[in-house]
């Protein structure tokens, strides 16, 4: 792999992170005027919180000093104190990471696998009935608001059919007899949120994979592969799909933003105890330090994920390698 | 012996605007060890002939009639699996634009060996050995076997594509514009290589090109294609020197001869016809200065006028049916 | 003379319409969108509705029946009426936000692609930042800070959704810049302004147009989501706002499908229509397929 | 500087180098500055009414030479004189006048015409940009005249059509009309027929020839096809890796070329004739990348007649007979006087 290429990508990511830090800082401090006023307007803010924030912001100093302080605190892992939970933002966020990672991870993996498969089948059978069906399915799921799909699922599967629990990650008050019982309880709670989250993403991945494959199909090396006497299946599997998958790597990474958006909605609907729900609560209660902390963490995670995707891409595509 | 016999081949494309009669009644014969050039302007249907032989037409293309005999079997009567077995093993193609004919994410060696593994059931290792032999045949260093296509220069890619076409020892190789977009010197290298390989490996060859002037060193026979039909076919010297069809004459004169007199080349007035609604009678008549009433009404048939020289023109062949 | 010019342009437009007519997806999209645009303009006249007119206790979440085709909501208001008046708001927000996004994206994309070098590097870093920041959290944060007015929502959506357009336009501008007609323009002494206005923009425009329609779909989805999460403008109830109230009032747990389904289905229909149209235009106008 | 009045273009020691690394990140990261010496010191003159051809393979720098002469790419070194005067590309007024007198015809008529403009707008663009016409009628008149020069008659039939409504040959004629509309004195034609079907090439070439004869326009004809160059030009220069290796009368360059590269090019030129006795000199390998130019004579790694001297010292372009110059150690008799290439 090309060292310069990777170094370049890393530097670019660092620049982006710095830009995000600046944006984050200004969004919460400069734009709406004095942040202290906003905090004071917040009925749930305690005097201690105000005092702490005041000290944290160092509002009497010029903005670049304030920014320096802000960065210093960040580097020490200090993201401020949540109004709502009266605890350090870092700790609040940390307690919510695992459920989100679980939800987003499973949802994303399912969406990528099924979406890619649908895209392959649709492109392969282009213009045929199965393509039209899959294409319509993809376009319709792609057009659905995530939260709405979630509510409809709750209303239908949980309330109407009583098949799944409506909220939470575990059944409250239940003591488990075995690890397996715990896993199965979580799985039952996870089913609908994951279904919702992956359904809205499947459509997009399917559309992208289909387009990408259709592009590849017009390439001369595909005709060559057919001329070599290989059956269609072999040509698609060995020659077309590996090429068509390349753009998918980048898209999946960029789409992490979309997944986060989906997670916020799904977690809100299903009261899933993750970062998305936390963000919704922070928003509802105007808990700015918490909101800012989540925003920052999530954004940096997405930037790092994109960097990883770039590296994976340059590993997979021999043309970038050197 | 005749290895390939194409009889009255008709290949049409159904598109929104109508049916394009890209190939409309083409017949020719390729003898064992012979090299035939198919020459004509762009859009005359020469590539479609090649794609019809191996049945690699795009979905909107369809073979509307005719027969294609390869060693006595009609390829058009074979089912999908049978025709697949013939591809590459018996008839392989060198496609136009080598840079695009190679899969960018697959090692060059693997792209060549996969055909051997698939068609001849070779083990991966023996297939690799074969690739190394092929590389030395086309003069590529065998250390480059694990390179990706983008690491090859233009000329090397073309050589690799040729090596690929030879992988299964085919009986016929079809070169579709094998040297277009290459520099003259590399063009000369490739043509020389193709000539040598054809003789060494005892293959038959079809060279498809718009460049009539490259055929002198490469082909025994030349067929001139105009608007989906062969208008003249004969030995390459005959086509260059004793052509009788007005189109062939114009085409030959369109190429300068730097070893001859410096005179301006000729152009052919008008444009090739629309193949959805080709002109009645002789398809060349709207551009032909000798056209008569008969040319406008009656379509000329390909007639033998001596040796192996056939021509489809009312003005030249006297033996009317 | 001018007539001949007009005739040439007319020929071109007619050709576009011809190819559009044969595009099934595009036609379906156009018809659906047409219906909703009609509703947005004339709906409130045909079917008057006052969002401040609350119903009585027995009207609350009443199922469909005579006098209320789609039942009523948590405040006893008519769902159909809310739906029709929401059409105007959802469409307006979507379209206005898209215009902002398109203008910003096109300017940044063209400048970046045409000038290249340092300008390009700086603008693209900036664009990448917007591309990579998860858009919903950013919108939520912005909306929370700016406050929930309908203009703020439009601004927030417009200012967070231009990055994709900028990328696409930049790529297109880059390729057009390399075309020989731009080189020709330079060789006859044309300046940057002339080249951008006469050559780059007209050739970027079809792509921007197709892209704009796709962005509209995203903008409408964004508005719905923002409103659902409580960031909407309560004085301008959109479809998303209706869903917000449906969720908050527990329509799901009482099985009030008449309150839950219609606004969502409307969103799906409009977004789908925009997507269809976008795809159709892309197919017709895509310069990749245009040659010969 | 003698005899300059007769020269439309005179080029002295022209150099065009491109920096490979772009963007500041790459500048930091790149170990060394990589330069492509696309044009590496060429001398050339073109007289009034003369057609000079540059023949070379891809990567030889022939197109860059053409563009540099028109100031479309920045030169790294050397001088370019137009009618005896050097033009300062930073001087807008000088450049504007120069642009009106020197035009370029591009290779691909599918790309050189803006697909969104109608023909009258395309052809009148140079007039509008340079503010040379005042009224619509005047503009139309000049466009019609240019179209007729380019052989598109009746011109009125073409004015309000889009490029895609024309055939390839017609498009190239439109492109030529677009260059002729300013009545330039010098035209760089970059592979003007290589994208066209053979059946219409002759028409375009004849058009250029007639134009040159009747109006005394000078042409720099850039092509990879030696036989086309031989067909229409007065003089031919063969270019290899950014240098002119041989230049002389067109017939001489084919019949009596002396440089091994030109000789090899001539020997492999395809012709519509079967020549059983033909001996081809097929050079091995490919033109090297201009990033790594070989030492000594840049042609030595592929030269069939290479000598020890060729690896060490670079041969200069010397006159071997009146008007015929070559840069090769093989053909450098001591008695030949060293002079610039002037015919």
Image (cartoon, coloured by chain):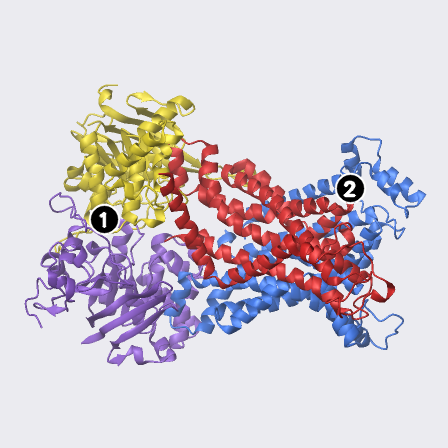
Chain colours: A blue, B purple, C red, D yellow
* C94 to B314, vertically: above or below: above
Disc 1 residue crowd, few under 14, some 14–19, many 20+, Cα 10 Å: many
* Residue A45 against residue B157 in the figure, above or below: above
Q: Please give the label number shown on residue D200.
A: 1
Viewer-nearest residue: D67 or C46? C46
Q: Which one is in front in this view, the residue at disc 1 or the one at disc 2?
A: 1
- Could you tell me which secondary element the residue under label 2 belongs to? helix
The chain under label 2 reads A
Question: Residue D203's spot in the image, x, y percent?
Answer: 21, 44
| Residue tagged 2 | A28
Q: Is residue D236 rendered to the left or right of residue D60?
A: left
On-image quarter of the N terminus of chain C: top left
Q: Quadrant of residue A267?
A: bottom right
What's the residue at 31%, 70% (across, down)? Answer: B52
Q: Is residue D55 left or right of residue A139?
A: left
Relative horizontal placement of residue A43, taking residue D250 as reference (left or right): right
The percent position of residue B201, horizontal first and vertical second, equals 25, 69
Q: Quadrant of residue A245?
A: bottom right
Residue D305 visible somewhere in the drawing = no
**Category of crowding for the residue at label 2, using alpha-carbon neighbours closer than 10 angstroms: few (below 14), some (14–19), many (at least 20):** many
Residue A230 falls left or right of residue B45:
right
Farthest residue, direction top: D1
Q: CA distance from mark 1 to mark 2?
A: 68 Å
Residue B173, x across and y down, in percent: 28, 67
Q: Residue at x 39, y 50 (%)?
A: C11
């Amino acid at each position: 792999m090309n060292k310069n290429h990777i170094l370049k990508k890393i530097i670019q990511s660092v620049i982006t992170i710095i830009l995000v830090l600046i944006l984050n800082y200004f969004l919460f401090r400069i734009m709406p005027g004095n942040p202290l006023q906003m905090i004071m307007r917040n009925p749930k803010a305690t005097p201690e919180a105000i005092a702490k924030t005041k000290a944290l912001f160092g509002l009497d100093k010029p903005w670049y000093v304030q920014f320096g302080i802000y960065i210093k605190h960040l580097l020490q892992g200090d993201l401020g104190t949540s109004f709502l939970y009266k605890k350090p933002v870092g700790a609040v966020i940390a307690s919510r990471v695992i459920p989100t990672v679980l939800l987003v991870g499973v949802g994303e993996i399912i969406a990528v696998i099924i979406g890619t498969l649908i895209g392959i089948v649709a492109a392969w059978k282009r213009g045929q009935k199965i393509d039209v069906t899959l294409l319509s399915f993809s376009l319709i799921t792609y057009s659905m608001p995530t939260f709405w799909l979630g509510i409809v699922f709750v209303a239908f599967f949980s309330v109407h059919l009583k098949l799944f629990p409506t909220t939470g990650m575990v059944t409250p008050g239940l003591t488990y007899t075995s690890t397996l019982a715990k896993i199965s309880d979580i799985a039952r709670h996870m089913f609908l949120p994951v279904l919702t989250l992956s359904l809205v993403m499947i459509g997009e991945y399917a559309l992208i994979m289909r387009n990408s494959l259709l592009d590849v199909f017009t390439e001369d090396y595909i005709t060559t592969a057919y001329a070599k006497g290989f059956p269609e299946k072999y040509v698609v599997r060995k020659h077309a799909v590996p090429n068509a998958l390349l753009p998918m790597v980048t898209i999946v990474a960029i789409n992490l933003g979309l997944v986060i958006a989906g997670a916020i909605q799904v977690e809100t609907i299903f009261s899933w105890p993750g970062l998305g729900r936390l963000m919704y609560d922070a928003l509802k209660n105007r808990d700015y330090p918490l909101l800012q902390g989540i925003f920052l963490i999530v954004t940096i995670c997405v930037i790092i994920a994109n960097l990883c995707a770039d590296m994976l891409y340059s590993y997979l595509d021999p043309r970038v390698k050197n | 012996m005749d290895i390939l016999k194409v009889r009255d081949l008709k290949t049409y494309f159904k598109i929104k605007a109508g049916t394009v009669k890209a190939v409309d009644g083409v017949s020719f014969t390729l003898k064992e060890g012979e090299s035939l050039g198919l020459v004509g302007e762009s859009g005359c249907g020469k590539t479609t002939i090649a794609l019809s032989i191996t049945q690699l037409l795009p979905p909107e293309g369809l073979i509307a009639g005719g027969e294609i005999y390869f060693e006595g079997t009609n390829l058009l009567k074979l089912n999908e699996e049978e025709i697949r077995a013939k591809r590459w093993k018996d008839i392989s193609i060198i496609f136009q634009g080598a840079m695009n004919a190679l899969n960018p994410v697959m090692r060059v060696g693997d792209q060549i060996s996969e055909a051997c593994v698939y068609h001849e059931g070779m083990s991966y290792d023996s297939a690799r050995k074969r690739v190394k032999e092929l590389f030395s045949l086309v003069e590529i260093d065998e250390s480059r076997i694990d390179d990706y296509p983008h690491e090859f220069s233009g000329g090397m890619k073309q050589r690799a594509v040729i090596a690929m076409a030879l992988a299964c020892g085919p009986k016929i190789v079809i070169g579709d514009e094998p040297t277009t977009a290459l520099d003259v010197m590399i063009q000369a290298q490739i043509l020389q290589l193709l000539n040598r390989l054809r003789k060494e490996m005892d293959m038959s060859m079809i060279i498809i090109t718009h460049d009539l002037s490259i055929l002198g060193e490469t082909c025994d026979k030349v067929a001139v294609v105009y608007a989906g039909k062969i208008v003249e076919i004969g030995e390459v010297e005959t086509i260059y020197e004793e052509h009788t069809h007005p189109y062939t004459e114009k085409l030959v004169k369109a190429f300068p001869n730097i070893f001859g007199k410096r005179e301006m080349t000729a152009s052919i007035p008008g444009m090739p016809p629309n193949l959805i609604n080709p002109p009645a009678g002789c398809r060349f008549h709207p551009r032909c200065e000798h056209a008569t009433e008969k040319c406008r009404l009656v379509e000329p048939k390909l007639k033998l006028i001596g040796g192996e020289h056939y021509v489809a023109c009312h003005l030249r062949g006297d033996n009317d049916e | 003379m001018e007539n001949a010019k007009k005739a040439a342009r007319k020929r071109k437009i007619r050709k576009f319409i011809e190819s559009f007519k044969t595009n099934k997806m595009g036609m379906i999209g156009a018809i659906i969108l047409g219906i909703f645009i009609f509703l947005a303009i004339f709906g409130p006249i045909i079917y008057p509705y006052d969002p401040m007119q609350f119903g009585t206790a027995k009207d609350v979440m009443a199922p469909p029946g005579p006098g209320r085709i789609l039942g009523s909501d948590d405040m006893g208001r008519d769902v159909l009426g809310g739906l029709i008046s929401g059409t105007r708001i959802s469409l307006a927000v979507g379209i206005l936000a898209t215009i902002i996004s398109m203008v910003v994206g096109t300017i940044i994309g063209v400048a970046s692609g045409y000038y290249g070098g340092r300008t390009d590097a700086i603008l693209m870093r900036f664009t990448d930042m917007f591309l990579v920041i998860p858009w919903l959290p950013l919108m939520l944060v912005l909306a929370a800070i700016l406050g929930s007015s309908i203009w703020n929502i439009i601004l927030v959506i417009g200012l967070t959704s231009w990055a994709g357009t900028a990328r696409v336009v930049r790529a297109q501008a880059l390729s057009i810049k390399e075309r020989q007609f731009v080189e020709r323009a330079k060789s006859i002494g044309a300046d940057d302004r002339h080249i951008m206005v006469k050559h780059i923009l007209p050739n970027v425009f079809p792509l921007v147009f197709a892209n704009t329609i796709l962005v509209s779909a995203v903008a409408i989805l964004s508005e719905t989501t923002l409103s659902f999460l409580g960031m909407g403008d309560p004085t301008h109830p959109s479809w998303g706002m209706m869903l917000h109230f449906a969720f908050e009032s527990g329509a799901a747990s009482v099985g009030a499908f008449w309150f839950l389904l219609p606004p969502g289905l409307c969103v799906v229909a409009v977004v789908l229509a925009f997507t269809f149209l976008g795809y159709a235009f892309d197919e017709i106008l895509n310069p990749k397929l245009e040659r010969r | 500087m003698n005899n300059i009045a007769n020269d439309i273009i005179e080029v002295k020691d022209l150099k065009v180098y491109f920096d490979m690394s772009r963007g500041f990140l790459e500048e930091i990261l790149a170990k060394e500055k990589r330069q492509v010496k696309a044009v590496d010191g060429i001398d050339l003159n073109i007289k009034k009414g003369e057609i000079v051809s540059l023949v070379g393979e891809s990567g030889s720098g022939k197109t860059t030479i053409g563009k540099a002469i028109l100031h479309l790419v920045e030169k790294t070194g050397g001088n370019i004189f137009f009618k005896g005067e050097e033009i300062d590309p930073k001087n807008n007024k000088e450049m504007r006048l120069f642009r009106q007198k020197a035009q370029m015809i591009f290779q691909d008529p599918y790309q050189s015409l803006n697909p969104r403009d109608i023909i009258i707008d395309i052809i009148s663009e140079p007039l509008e940009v340079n503010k040379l016409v005042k009224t619509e009628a005047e503009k139309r008149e000049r466009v019609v005249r240019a179209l007729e020069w380019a052989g598109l008659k009746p011109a009125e039939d073409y004015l309000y059509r889009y490029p895609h409504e024309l055939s390839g040959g017609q498009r190239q004629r439109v492109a030529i009309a677009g260059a002729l509309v300013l009545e330039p004195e010098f035209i760089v034609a970059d592979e003007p027929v290589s994208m066209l079907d053979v059946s219409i090439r002759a028409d375009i070439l004849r058009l250029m020839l007639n134009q040159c004869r009747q109006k005394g326009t000078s042409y720099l004809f850039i092509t990879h096809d030696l036989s086309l160059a031989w067909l229409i030009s007065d003089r031919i220069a063969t270019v290899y890796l950014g240098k002119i290796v041989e230049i002389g009368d067109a017939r001489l360059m084919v019949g009596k070329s002396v440089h091994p590269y030109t000789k090899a090019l001539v020997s492999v030129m395809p012709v519509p004739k079967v020549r059983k006795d033909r001996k081809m000199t097929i050079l091995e390998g490919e033109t090297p990348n201009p990033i790594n130019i070989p030492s000594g004579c840049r042609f030595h790694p592929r030269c069939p007649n290479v000598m020890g001297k060729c690896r060490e010292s670079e041969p200069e372009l010397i006159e071997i007979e009146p008007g015929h110059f070559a840069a090769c150690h093989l053909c450098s008799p001591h008695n030949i006087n060293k002079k610039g290439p002037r015919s």
